[in-house]
Image: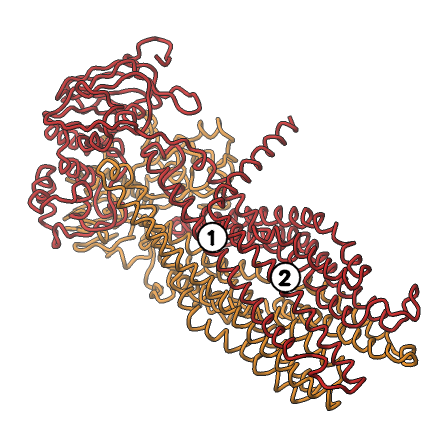
Chain colours: A red, B orange
């Protein structure tokens, strides 16, 4: 059981890594160039240290032998040193910009890909989560990859390359000093695991605790009016104080551990400098116990090594502080996984469609199976005559909505759906959509004026047409009373209108489309019985002559439909199976 | 009593803690630089001493070696101590801020301003903004304190070596310390302040696009909407990129300025060495220390971005807090109405801001023990009317009297129990949710009130009083949440009870059970029920809005 759990976790880690790699793939060229520049920067640093070391070695000689400065340190060398000073920050700057642009582009590409995925899912996307959660994923989670792409990715290579380059340079002058540094080198991967593990655990725990605390605070603040009303604000205040203190104490416990591993790295870094300095200094004095009266490393080499020493551990220290970027990115990718692994289906049809009147629909042995093999709609047969208006009922989960999605061309199905005589899968989807009117509970409104919202359905509609459809849905008198008429602003999600008025407005949008087929998905489920009765009456009046399919879990108020079908009764076999 | 948040006060509450963190951080940086400088001095001095055999044995290497070890230890321990204390201080600051903001919010009249759909987003931003405020001490104050201290220390050291050396170093050093970050000041702050607005716009754009996705796909409008959405994203990202690039650019300029400083130190230093005014080891120590100063100056490049973000966060929090609202005047003559109650409205009309319609010319006359049932189609203004009666909304015209006196002249806070349409269930147990209304309530009282709202059976099947209600009441159905809120209100024992749709999701037998319990509890008070269920209840007044 435990091993099974472990392997599934490993599997997940593998998937996450693969997805991260895929996300970065288009930008690897930039990132590798950035890495190259970083390596070049290290080489420049080595050169700069060498020049500095020789400058001071020259200075010592010059004070001893009283020769001129130009003899020991030529103007050429001085120019080279200045060049190094200019070059190294420049390389760093270009490297940062490359990484930032790479991250910018990779995230933009990923976001576009996800948005396209969502668009081709259509109403199906709701199986993945509410729109609020999805937009949050598209924005925050994708942005959470930034640190990984722009910093961590390159740093991961540097942490191996830089110490290696520095040891090689140091080896040339003093194998022992290089050995001293390299002795700690096997500790580098070890510390990557230790620091990484601790940092990732602590940052994950901290993030989890933080979001928990935030949501708790949010919970209280959202309910402020209730708390005030109940005179319970003191209780909430107490809870906030208590949980914030508790959060601080538990987080500090975790952080102390995490900082400890950072401190050990810091210690290594300090010790590398201190040990190297003592060894070299005592060596120069010729008082090393094992090498009396000999100078193992001449001054220039000694200073060169001393200048290199701080840089040996710098990438590892940087990696430690960037590690949370990796944890963050992995968490984000995990959140995005359902969306990334979504297999979208493209409606294949290419045949153009032109309808002059309401068509007949014929469904033969149609069934719908989900990706995971679950049967969403068992086999049904259904003939709808041209201009016939049908009510389709059934308990929730019986496949009503899935059938509508298939008719809308958003999900694949088995069996055959014919529009007049042409197979739906052969038809160009956009042409088919041009003939459809679709109405659901989801509001189709954005911030903007009434006219703008109506014109979403038909951008070319004239003002005359807008007034006409508003008259048809009995909103004209209300709109005419408004001081700004058609230019009245609607708030977020149609704020300012009642549910019934919004339904009427949605029907007005439908009318602007001048469609021959109406597919209605529980258009009144969110309304109270009285309002939904008036909306039903309105639908009755306006849908005469259209082929109409109304899906609903109830029968009341729908007596005007030509036919009512219980979805369960349509199933060809008792055992609900695909055809 | 209620003060707006000021950034400079943020450090004051935990002064000792912050001071220790600043001190330890300064010690760490100082040791890091000292370690390099002393090491450099040591090997150079050793090299010079080693040239003449006699002096190499008299050379005192114990003291520099001890100093090197000391710096190594202080650097390690200091870094650890600084991290621990500064995080402790930052977390304490967070705690104080949350506490302070919450207290401020409790004092304000938030009910009217916060029940729109955007309130959730506003509150999310508030929480994020509070978290953002710790950037002021961590990304602005501390880096500037350390950088300034280190720069001053360095210049003093250089001056002690030779005034000319200090003068040589100062030009580039001051540029890296003050001049370059000053560029960040006028560019970075605006960038950071625009940041959140751009982010908010992008979020709204995405949310709107997703909610319109299906329809726009059908209406062939999606491609252009998708393009607009991606453009909005791109604008925000470009803004972010600008911030990052500004920081990179500033850091480049800083390094160049430091390089100039180092070249100057070497240039003039070599002359000073030649004229025996400064020894080679000390010149090297000065040069190495200058390389180390870099570490202290780097965080300054991003400091103004941090400052701008904190300032923007502070402004938004202060805007949300009811600082400028007139405090309710609590004079002595606003007393509570006493039983028996008499509630009247005359030609009362009201409208919620932005709504297209509301109740008009309403007349009510209700006395203690009586029940009023308000019915009508949705959108007709039942909820608005109830809001006016709950004294949460001013009528646009007409009179609202309680015991013959205008309602706003009474102190109605603990008189009216109001179950609004949008209710709040907190992420806690059933018992904790109920006890908000009465912390002293016994378990028996809780079970009784649950029975009254027909939830006792359900609670018994669940986890009893310990049943978790989940975030925003997500673990229970809408109707159950409504009745949990009703039960909570009943525990508060308010003589005037106004309830909006208490019967949602209840069969008619349970509905009658609930209404009987409500009537019994309000036998000496008033009960007003808004419902679109046409229920046959005897002996009630009815008001049908149409």
Q: Which residue is mark 1?
A: A102
Rendered image quadrant of residue B69: bottom right
| Residue B316 percent across, percent down from the top left | 39, 62
Tell me the mark number nearer the camera, choosing from 2 and 1.
2
Residue sitting nearer the eye, B195 or B472: B195
Task: Please say if B45 is above or below A203.
Answer: below
Residue sitting nearer the eye, A417 or B280: B280
> Label 2: chain?
A
Between the residue at mark 2 and the residue at mark 1, the CA separation in whole angstroms equals 22 Å
Residue sitting nearer the eye, B370 or A261: A261
> Label 1: chain?
A
- Identify the element where label 1 is drawn: helix
Which residue lies at the image location 68% right of the left edge and 52% below the top edge? A257
| Residue A72 percent across, percent down from the top left | 72, 80
Residue sitting nearer the eye, A446 or A347: A347
Q: Are marks 2 and 1 in contact (CB under 8 Å)?
A: no
| Residue A85 percent across, percent down from the top left | 59, 71
**Badge 1, how many Cα within 10 Å: few under 14, some, many 20+?**
many
Disc with the residue nearer the chain's start (2 vs 1): 2
Which residue lies at the image location 50% right of the left edge and 72% below the top edge? B8
**Badge 2, how many Cα within 10 Å: few under 14, some, many 20+?**
many
Q: Residue B62: in sight, yes or no?
A: yes
- Identify the element where label 2 is drawn: helix
- Direction from residue A450 to residue B332 in the image, left or right: right
- Direction from residue B109 to residue A440 in the image, left or right: left
Quadrant where the C terminus of chain B sits is: top left
**Callout 2 and callout 1 share a chain:** yes
- Direction from residue A253 to residue B439 in the image, left or right: left
Which residue lies at the image location 51% right of the left edge and 45% below the top edge? B440
Q: Residue B453: in sight, yes or no?
A: no
Task: Please say if A88 is above or below B502.
Answer: below
Q: Which residue is mark 2?
A: A42
């Amino acid at each position: 059981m435990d091993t099974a759990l472990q392997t599934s976790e490993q599997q997940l880690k593998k998937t996450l890594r693969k997805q991260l790699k895929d996300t970065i793939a288009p930008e690897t060229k930039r990132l590798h160039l950035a890495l190259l520049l970083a390596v070049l920067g290290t080489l420049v640093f080595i050169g700069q240290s060498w020049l500095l070391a020789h400058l001071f070695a020259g200075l010592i000689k010059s004070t001893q032998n009283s020769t001129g400065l130009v003899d020991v340190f030529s103007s050429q060398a001085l120019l080279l040193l200045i060049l190094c000073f200019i070059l190294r920050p420049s390389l760093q700057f270009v490297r940062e910009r490359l990484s930032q642009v790479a991250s910018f582009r990779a995230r933009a590409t990923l976001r576009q890909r996800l948005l396209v995925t969502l668009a081709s899912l259509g109403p199906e996307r709701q199986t993945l989560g509410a729109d609020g959660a999805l937009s949050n994923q598209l924005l925050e989670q994708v942005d959470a990859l930034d640190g990984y792409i722009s910093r961590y990715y390159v740093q991961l290579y540097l942490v191996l390359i830089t110490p290696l380059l520095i040891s090689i340079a140091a080896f040339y002058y003093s194998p022992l000093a290089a050995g001293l540094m390299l002795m700690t080198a096997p500790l580098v991967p070890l510390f990557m695991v230790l620091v990484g593990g601790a940092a990732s655990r602590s940052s994950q725990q901290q993030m989890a605790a933080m979001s928990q605390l935030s949501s708790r605070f949010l919970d209280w603040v959202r309910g402020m009016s209730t708390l005030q009303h109940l005179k319970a604000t003191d209780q909430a205040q107490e809870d906030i104080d208590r949980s914030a203190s508790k959060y601080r104490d538990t987080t500090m416990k975790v952080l102390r551990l995490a900082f400890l591993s950072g401190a050990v790295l810091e210690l290594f870094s300090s010790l590398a400098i201190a040990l190297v300095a003592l060894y070299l200094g005592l060596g120069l004095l010729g008082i090393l116990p094992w090498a009396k009266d000999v100078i193992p490393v001449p001054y220039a080499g000694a200073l060169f090594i001393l200048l290199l020493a701080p840089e040996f551990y710098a990438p590892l220290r940087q990696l430690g502080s960037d590690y949370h970027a990796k944890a963050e990115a992995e968490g984000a990718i995990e959140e995005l996984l359902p969306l990334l692994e979504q297999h979208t289906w493209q409606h294949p049809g290419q045949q153009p469609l032109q309808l002059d009147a309401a068509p007949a629909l014929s469904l033969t042995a149609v069934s719908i199976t989900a990706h995971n093999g679950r049967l969403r709609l068992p086999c049904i047969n259904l003939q709808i005559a041209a201009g016939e208006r049908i009510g389709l009922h059934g308990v929730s989960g019986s496949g009503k909505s899935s059938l509508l999605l298939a008719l809308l061309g958003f999900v694949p199905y088995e069996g055959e759906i014919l529009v007049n005589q042409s197979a739906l899968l052969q038809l160009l989807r956009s042409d088919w959509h041009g003939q459809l009117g679709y109405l659901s509970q989801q509001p189709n409104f954005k911030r903007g004026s009434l006219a703008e919202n109506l014109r979403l359905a038909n951008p070319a509609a004239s003002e005359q047409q807008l007034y006409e459809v508003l008259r048809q849905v009995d909103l004209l008198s209300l709109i005419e009373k408004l001081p700004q008429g058609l230019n009245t602003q609607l708030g977020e999600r149609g704020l300012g209108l009642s549910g019934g008025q919004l339904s009427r407005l949605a029907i007005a949008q439908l009318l602007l489309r001048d469609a021959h087929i109406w597919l209605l998905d529980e258009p009144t489920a969110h309304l109270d019985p009285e309002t939904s009765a008036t909306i039903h009456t309105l639908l009755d009046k306006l849908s005469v002559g259209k082929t109409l399919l109304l899906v609903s879990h109830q029968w009341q108020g729908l007596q005007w439909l030509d036919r009512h079908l219980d979805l369960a009764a349509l199933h060809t076999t008792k055992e609900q199976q695909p055809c | 009593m209620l003060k707006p948040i000021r950034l400079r006060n943020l450090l004051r509450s935990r002064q000792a803690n912050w001071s220790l963190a600043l001190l330890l951080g300064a010690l760490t940086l100082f040791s890091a630089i000292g370690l390099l400088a002393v090491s450099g001095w040591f090997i150079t001095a050793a090299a010079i001493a080693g040239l003449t055999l006699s002096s190499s044995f008299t050379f005192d290497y114990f003291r520099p070696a001890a100093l090197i070890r000391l710096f190594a230890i202080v650097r390690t321990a200091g870094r650890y101590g600084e991290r621990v204390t500064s995080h402790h201080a930052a977390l304490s600051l967070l705690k104080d801020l949350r506490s302070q903001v919450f207290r401020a919010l409790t004092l304000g009249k938030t009910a009217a301003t916060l029940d729109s759909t955007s309130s959730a987003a506003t509150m999310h931003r508030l929480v994020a903004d509070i978290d953002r405020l710790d950037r002021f001490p961590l990304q602005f104050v501390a880096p500037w304190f350390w950088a300034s201290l280190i720069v001053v220390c360095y210049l003093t050291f250089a001056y002690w070596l030779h005034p000319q050396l200090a003068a040589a170093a100062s030009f580039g050093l001051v540029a890296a310390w003050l001049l370059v970050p000053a560029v960040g000041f006028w560019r970075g702050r605006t960038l950071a302040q625009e940041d959140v607005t751009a982010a908010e716009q992008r979020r709204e754009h995405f949310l709107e696009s997703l909610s319109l996705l299906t329809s726009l796909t059908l209406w062939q409008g999606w491609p252009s909407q998708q393009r607009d959405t991606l453009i909005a994203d791109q604008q925000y990202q470009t803004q972010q990129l600008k911030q990052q690039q500004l920081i990179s650019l500033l850091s480049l300029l800083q390094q160049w300025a430091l390089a100039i400083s180092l070249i100057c130190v070497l240039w003039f230093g070599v002359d000073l060495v030649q004229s025996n005014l400064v020894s080679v080891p000390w010149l090297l120590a000065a040069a190495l220390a200058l390389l180390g100063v870099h570490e202290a100056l780097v965080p300054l490049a991003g400091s103004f971005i941090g400052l701008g973000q904190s300032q923007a966060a502070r402004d938004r929090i202060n805007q949300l807090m009811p600082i400028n609202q007139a405090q309710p005047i609590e004079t002595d003559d606003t007393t509570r109405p006493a039983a028996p109650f008499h509630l009247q409205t005359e030609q009362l009309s009201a409208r919620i801001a932005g709504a297209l319609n509301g109740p008009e010319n309403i007349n009510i006359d209700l006395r203690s023990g009586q029940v009023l049932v308000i019915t009508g189609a949705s959108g007709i203004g039942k909820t608005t009317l109830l809001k006016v009666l709950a004294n949460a909304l001013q009528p646009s015209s007409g009179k609202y009297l309680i015991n013959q006196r205008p309602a706003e002249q009474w102190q109605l806070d603990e008189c009216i129990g109001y179950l609004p349409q949008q209710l709040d269930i907190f992420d806690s147990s059933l018992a904790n949710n109920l006890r908000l209304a009465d912390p002293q309530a016994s378990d028996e009282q809780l079970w009784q009130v649950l029975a009254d709202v027909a939830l006792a059976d359900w609670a018994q099947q669940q986890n009893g009083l310990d049943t978790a209600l989940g975030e925003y009441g997500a673990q229970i159905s809408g109707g159950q949440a409504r009745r949990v809120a009703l039960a909570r209100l009943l525990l508060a024992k308010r003589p005037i009870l106004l309830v909006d749709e208490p019967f949602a999701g209840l069969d008619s037998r349970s509905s009658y059970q609930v209404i009987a319990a409500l009537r019994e509890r309000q036998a000496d008070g008033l009960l007003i029920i808004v419902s679109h269920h046409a229920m046959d209840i005897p002996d009630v007044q009815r008001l049908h809005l149409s």
